[in-house]
């Protein structure tokens, strides 16, 4: 009973700090039970500070669209300024999707490591759904390691040009360890040109065949050659085109028709 009275007192203190107009609107749209539950799980000072920095409409939308358990964890794992920045920079539906799909502690780690502005830039530039899909394949600490090795902009440029399926193929077959080496050696633009020319499957097959070091050494060797693209014969097709052409020009084998049996006429004696 004592705990209930303390919680009720906390609710009234919370509403009193917000002022009559704002507190009335929040209480009207959320109801006493939701407020009672939330104020029992989040420190009163933090809840007051956050609510003061947001409009009553935003507070109501947040509480209604994000499950209480997730919202409490979001507040626990993120700084007030970071939370307010995320709420103002992303739409509430997008924020709700992120909070349900990416653990709040990972979002907090992202903001603390890259800064809140860069974190929002990642989500917006890659798109919410693509960011979520990739972070399901790559642990947050591995992603932050990659950004530390390569910097953020090249990673965004690379991932923007690749499909989620291609990213998954690369991660599954090659992991992340070689990526900083390749991006530093070739540059992100040249890496994308290789993928564009060969396709992800053939690029992966070539790396598997040659090995990373041998492929880089071969690239250096080829870059020193004085080659002229105009000297490539026009009739020399790629493997796929060559195979298709052979299939088109293949002469069908005629089936041998069995010889007709001669009719035997029997004479009557």
Image: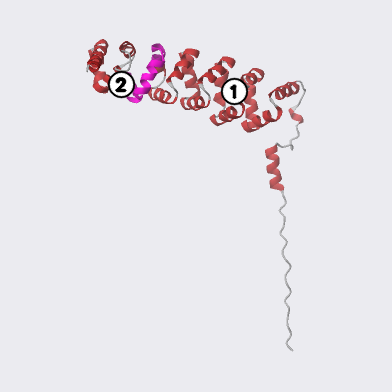
Q: Residue at x 72, y 51 (%)?
A: 251
Q: Which mark is residue 18?
A: none
The residue sitting at the front extreme is 1
* SS under mark 2: helix
11 or 205: nearer the eye? 11
* Above or below 218: residue 202: below
In x, y percent, where is residue 88? Answer: 39, 16
What's the distance in space between the residues labelled 1 and 2, CA to CA?
A: 41 Å
Q: Quadrant of residue 44?
A: top left
Indicate whether 83 appears above or below 160: above
Q: Position of residue 56 (x, y in %)?
A: 30, 17
Q: Is residue 258 left or right of residue 2?
A: right
Q: Residue at x 51, y 26 (%)?
A: 134
Image quadrant for the N terminus?
Answer: top left
- Tell me, yes or no, if residue 98 can be seen here: yes
Magenta range? 57-85
Nearest the viewer among 263 and 193 is 263
């Amino acid at each position: 009973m004592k705990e209930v009275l303390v919680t009720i007192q906390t609710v009234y203190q919370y509403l009193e700090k917000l002022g009559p107009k704002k507190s009335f609107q929040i209480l009207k749209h959320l109801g006493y039970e939701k407020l009672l539950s939330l104020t029992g799980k989040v420190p009163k000072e933090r809840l007051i500070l956050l609510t003061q920095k947001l409009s009553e409409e935003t507070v109501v939308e947040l509480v209604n669209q994000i499950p209480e358990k997730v919202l409490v964890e979001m507040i626990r794992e993120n700084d007030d300024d970071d939370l307010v920045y995320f709420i103002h920079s992303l739409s509430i539906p997008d924020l709700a999707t992120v909070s349900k799909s990416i653990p709040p502690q990972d979002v907090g780690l992202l903001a603390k490591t890259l800064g809140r502005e860069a974190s929002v830039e990642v989500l917006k530039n890659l798109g919410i759904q693509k960011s979520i899909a990739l972070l399901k394949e790559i642990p947050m600490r591995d992603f932050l390691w990659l950004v530390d090795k390569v910097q953020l902009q090249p990673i965004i440029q690379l991932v923007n040009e690749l499909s989620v399926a291609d990213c998954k193929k690369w991660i599954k077959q090659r992991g992340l360890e070689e990526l900083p080496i390749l991006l530093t050696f070739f540059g992100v633009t040249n890496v994308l040109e290789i993928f564009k020319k060969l396709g992800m499957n053939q690029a992966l097959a070539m790396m598997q065949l040659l090995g990373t070091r041998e492929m880089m050494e071969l690239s250096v060797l080829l870059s020193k050659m004085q080659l002229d693209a105009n000297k490539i014969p026009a009739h020399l097709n790629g493997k796929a085109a060559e195979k298709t052409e052979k299939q088109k020009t293949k002469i069908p084998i005629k089936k041998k028709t069995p010889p007709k049996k001669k009719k035997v006429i029997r004479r009557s004696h």
